[in-house]
Amino acid sequence: MKIVLAVDGSAYTKRMLSYIAAHDELVGQGNEFVALNVTAGVPPHAARHLPHDVLQRYYADEGEKVLAPVREFARMQGWKLRERHAVGYPGDALAEMTNEEKPDLLVMGSHGHGAFASALLGSVSSRLLAHTKAPVLLIR
């Protein structure tokens, strides 16, 4: 089974990973996991003042900050993990990547790093629910 993990490095991502590891009866063993992460783009009015290589390094570093702990957690669990990172609006980019992957299951935390973490459901989670075709498991 192919399982997409929408990760952003927040406490909800950590809970989601721990939940899946503790409940392997939900997904079984021998799955392919794909960790998806999106770094929000630097606003164009600021980006135009930065050298292209500096901006690209920033995006790569931000993605690595999130994906490195996920990679290590997956290694400790014995999961087969593939990673994808993109730059853009997280809701749209994650939905697009999820649809490209055509997973059997999308797993994500109910909230992320957003300023309105106390909202009923995070805006990225809402976007993914509305714009993906995969079954979704939301972890609070």
Image (cartoon, rainbow, N blue to C red):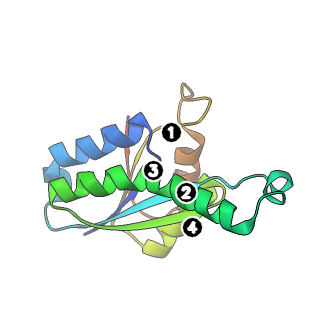
Cα separation, mark 1 vs mark 3, equals: 15 Å
The mark tally for this picture is: 4
- Residue type at the position of mark 3: Lys
Kind of residue indicated by mark 2: Val
Residue beneath disc 4: 96
Q: Locate the C terminus and report the quarter of the image it occupies.
A: top left
Q: Nearer the viewer, mark 1 or mark 4?
A: 1
Q: Residue 112 bears which disc, if any?
A: 1
Secondary structure under badge 3? helix
Q: Which residue is mark 3?
A: 65
Alpha carbon separation for disc pair 2 and 1: 12 Å
Q: Earlier in the sequence, mark 1 or mark 3?
A: 3
Q: Give residue 37's position: percent from left, percent from top.
A: 49, 57
Q: Nearer the viewer, residue 111 or 127?
A: 111
Q: CA distance from mark 2 to mark 3?
A: 11 Å
Mark sitting earlier along the chain (1/4): 4
